[in-house]
Image (cartoon, helix red, strand yellow):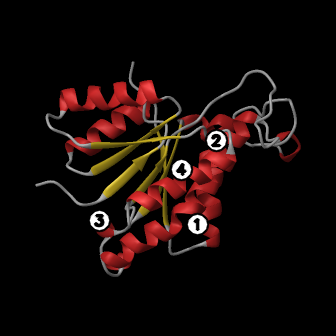
Amino acid sequence: MASTRLVLVTGATDGIGRETALEVKRKGFRVVLHGRSNERLEATRAWIVGHVAGAHIELAKADLSVLAEVRALAADVARRFETLDVLLNNAGIYANEGRLTADSWESTWGVNHVAPFVLTLAVLPLLRAAQAATGDARSSTSAASRTVAVASSQQRGGRPRASSRTARTPTPSSRTSCSRTSCSGVSRRWPSTRCIRASCRPSS
């Protein structure tokens, strides 16, 4: 039986995000795919439908290096849905060269830490609405709304430097540590919000 629960997967057009979206859909959840390209989003939807016949999948386009688009993504989801059960912050980059986002953040830090933090805060009302609809989340782990932050196992060694958050020199290992930092920040400020960190490494 199809579930009424809704999952938003960022960075869903490739790699871990795409495979996760497929498995979530196979389990019967409603899925919103996020990506930066309409063409890749449509291709990913077709790929999932090829594996799950008749699957209905929603799409949401946004460039997470631009905070205005991050907020617009949250507003778009809020317009289309009353609740959100799972926010899966999967999107991430690693920039070998120093460059800044449109908001003057070092690009790796901006996309991997700032963007998911801003997105999580923006959709908290939807997550709380889903949690309220299922009753007291503390009584049922499976029913609780949650955020999930995806990173690689290298996050254990990641120590982002404050001096490089807006510098042109990329922060070593920030690709993997930012999701952990963002998730921890949300959990500290809003203890009732379930935030799960998942370290993933695609199989070869």
Check whether the beta carbons of the residues at disc 1 and disc 4 lie within 8 A of each other.
no
Give the mark count.
Answer: 4
Q: Nearer the viewer, residue 82 or 15?
A: 82
| Numbered circle sitting on residue 73 | 4
Q: CA distance from mark 1 to mark 3?
A: 18 Å
First in residue order: circle 3 vs circle 4: 4
Camera-nearest label, 2 or 1: 2
How many residues crowd mark 2 within 10 Å: few (<14), some (14–19), many (20+)?
many
Instruction: Determine the secondary structure under disc 3.
Output: helix
Q: Amino acid at mark 1?
A: Ser
Query: Which label's residue is closer to the chain start, 2 or 3?
Result: 2
Look at the numbered discs 2 and 1 and tell me whether their residues touch, using CB distance below 8 Å: no
Of tags 2 and 3, which is closer to the observer?
2
Q: Which residue is mark 2?
A: 112
Residue where numbered disc 1 is placed = 187
Q: Which mark is residue 54?
A: none
Q: Nearer the viewer, mark 2 or mark 4?
A: 4
Say which amino acid is labelled 2: Asn
Which is nearer the N-term, disc 1 or disc 4? Answer: 4
